[in-house]
Image: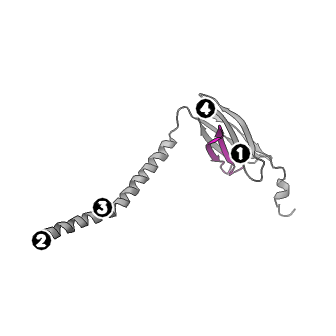
Amino acid sequence: MEQKVTIQMISNAARTSWQAIFPFSALVVLLLFAYATEHQAQIRDPQMTKLSGVVIDDHCAGLGRVEITAKKNGKIIARAKTEVDGKYELDLMPGVYSLEFKLFPFIPFEVPRYVVPIGAKFWKLDVCLECEDCGERLYLPGT
């Protein structure tokens, strides 16, 4: 009878330790998978083209936080935001895209048919956003 109790206690202890370890090991596996997936996405496909450029306003100042959307057949393929100085980068496969550049209060700029050629590694597109009524919307101290 004593041996059964000892075996049962060891079995319960093993189960308890497994239950304590399982959530931790599952978390480690999940983190490793996320890390591998992220780094896999950073490896560029040899057919990819890096579309880059600068988005400026009508006074030639770089615009940060401009939302850039690349669509193919109406489906969003890639998104990006410009850096503080207006620079951006998008990785796109060769094909025909619709590109949109948006930042309030500027007028959205759309390129309805932008061709990314086969074999191009780097392609450049600079954009100037216009603001019809920025003067009315912006408060300038001392004016």
Task: Report x, y in % for residue 94.
Answer: 61, 32
Q: Please tell me which residue is depicted at 30% across the width and 61% down the height of the picture.
A: 18
Q: Disc 1 vs disc 2: which is toward the camera?
A: 2
Q: Tell me where residue 5 appears, x and y as whole percent.
A: 17, 70
Residue 101 bears which disc, if any? 1
- Residue 94's tag is 4
Q: Which comes before the other along the chain, label 1 or label 2?
A: 2
Q: State the extent of the magenta-drawn residues as a range.
A: 63-87
Q: In which quarter of the image is the C terminus?
A: bottom right
**Is residue 68 magenta-colored?**
yes
Q: Of label 3 and label 4, which has the lower sequence position?
A: 3
Rendered location of residue 4, percent (x, y) = 15, 68
Q: Residue furthest top?
A: 119
Mark 3 or 4, which is nearer the eye? 3
Q: Residues within 10 Å of mark 4 (few under 14, many from 20)?
A: some
- Per the rendering, the mark at residue 18 is 3
Q: Is residue 16 rendered to the left or right of residue 67?
A: left
**Mark 1 vs 4, N-terminal side:** 4
